Amino acid sequence: MLSELDRYLSKGTEKGVEDPLAWWHDHCGEYPRLWHMAHDYLTIPATSVAVECAWTKQKLVKNSDLFKATRLPEVKEDDETLVEYDYPIV
């Protein structure tokens, strides 16, 4: 019996998919574990420097806070937090 990941990878790509989140929603019964991971990844909000600039211009961000944010320590791969799921993919 193939795992969800093997079944998904053997299916190949579909042409004309414009909304990946909608595609995963349509296939959540077929790939429930992968759907949860895709949902977590695809629903991460996008941010941009433009928002930070707008907040700074409106005095919603203190200059000292902005300085601290640009001076964050470098994160090493071993220190990164990984999402754990209660069930194996394979």
Image (tube, rainbow, N blue to C red):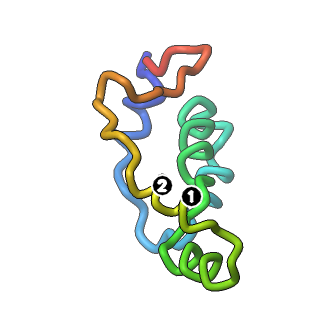
73 sits to left or right of 64: left
Q: Which residue is mark 2?
A: 69
Amino acid carrying mark 2 in the image: Ala
Compared with residue 76, is residue 46 higher up or lower down, i.e. above or below?
below
Amino acid carrying mark 1 in the image: Asp
Find residue 45 and name its label: none
Across and down, in percent, residue 17 comes to: 50, 69
30 sits to left or right of 9: right
Across and down, in percent, residue 71 comes to: 38, 51
Question: Depth-wise, is mark 1 or mark 2 nearer the camera?
Answer: 1
Compared with residue 35, is residue 33 higher up or lower down, i.e. above or below?
above
Farthest residue toward the front?
Answer: 64
19 sits to left or right of 28: left
Compared with residue 68, is residue 80 higher up or lower down, i.e. above or below?
above
Across and down, in percent, residue 53 comes to: 54, 80
Q: Residues within 10 Å of mark 2 (few under 14, many from 20)?
A: few
Q: Which residue is mark 1?
A: 65
Q: Residue at x 42, y 62 (%)?
A: 14
Kindly indicate the quadrant of the structure image that contains residue 32: top right
Residue in the foreground of this view, choosing between 75 and 35: 75
Question: What element does badge 1 sit on?
Answer: helix
Q: Residue at x 31, y 40 (%)?
A: 74
* Count of numbered circles in the view: 2
Question: What element does badge 2 sit on?
Answer: helix
